Image: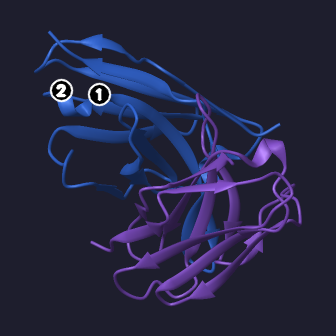
Chain colours: A purple, B blue
Amino acid sequence: EIVMTQSPATLSVSPGERATLSCRASQSVSSNLAWYQQKPGQAPRLLIYGASTRATGIPARFSGSGSGTEFTLTISSLQSEDFAVYYCQQYNNWWTFGQGTKVEIK
Amino acid sequence: EVQLVESGGGLVQPGGSLRLSCAASGFTFSSYWMHWVRQAPGKGLVWVSRINSDGSSTSYADSVKGRFTISRDNAKNTLYLQMNSLRAEDTAVYYCARAHNYYYYYYMDVWGKGTTVTVSS
């Protein structure tokens, strides 16, 4: 099983600041990596697929990068609605999720 | 509007059974693989099972293999998860998700709101 490890577990950021979330795979997943946003009591929402392609309707302040085993989700200027938990997921070999990064208001 | 609506969750005793349903609308259901993903209280997302578009191929996480069965009825645009021999550790919100084929790799692009399963005596 491919293990996905996200860091940090919690990220405290002020509105308007930049947030950088990391995700590492235990073996290469090529670019078969997605990012999801989940708010309390809601279903996950797809943000990024193919490591760097924004899903339909996702604002340009969200960007993804990386390939192989190291990936990054960047939120360029945090808005109030962006405070949530973010999960990375590999879909190269079955499907596994990271444990999540909680982005909270500083 | 593309929509997935889960139902069938509830409280069940250990060792009991439950069948979850996921009603799809707004897209050609029979063209898509589908998944079940679960989330225990306060925990992260865990993939449970997937089924291909015509129902001829299925896969399961080791934790549910032999106890859960995924199926679909394309005439009714509905996905199912039959859960038997339920354990306390199966307590979770269960989400169905549509799988999008991207160069023969499948990510989850649409999610339902989930249905809650509680296994307790």
Pick the residue in front: B20 or B121: B121
Pick the residue in front: A24 or A91: A24
Residue at 38% over, 41% down: B43
Q: Is residue B105 left or right of residue B12?
A: right
Numbered-mark total: 2
Question: Residue A54's spot in the image, x, y percent?
Answer: 78, 68
Q: Quadrant of residue A61?
A: bottom right
Question: Residue B62's spot in the image, x, y percent?
Answer: 19, 55
In terms of secondary structure, where does tag 2 sit?
A: helix
Residue located beneath label 1 in the image: B91
Residue located beneath label 2 in the image: B88
Q: Are marks 1 and 2 in contact (CB under 8 Å)?
A: yes
Question: Residue A80's spot in the image, x, y percent?
Answer: 82, 43
Compared with A87, A39 (above or below) is above
The amino acid pointed to by label 1 is Thr
Q: Which mark is residue B102?
A: none
The amino acid pointed to by label 2 is Ala
Pick the residue in front: B18 or A30: A30
Q: Quadrant of residue B120?
A: top left
Between marks 1 and 2, how big is the CA–CA gap?
Answer: 6 Å
Compared with B83, B107 (above or below) is below
Regarding residue B86, the answer to whether it shows in the image is no
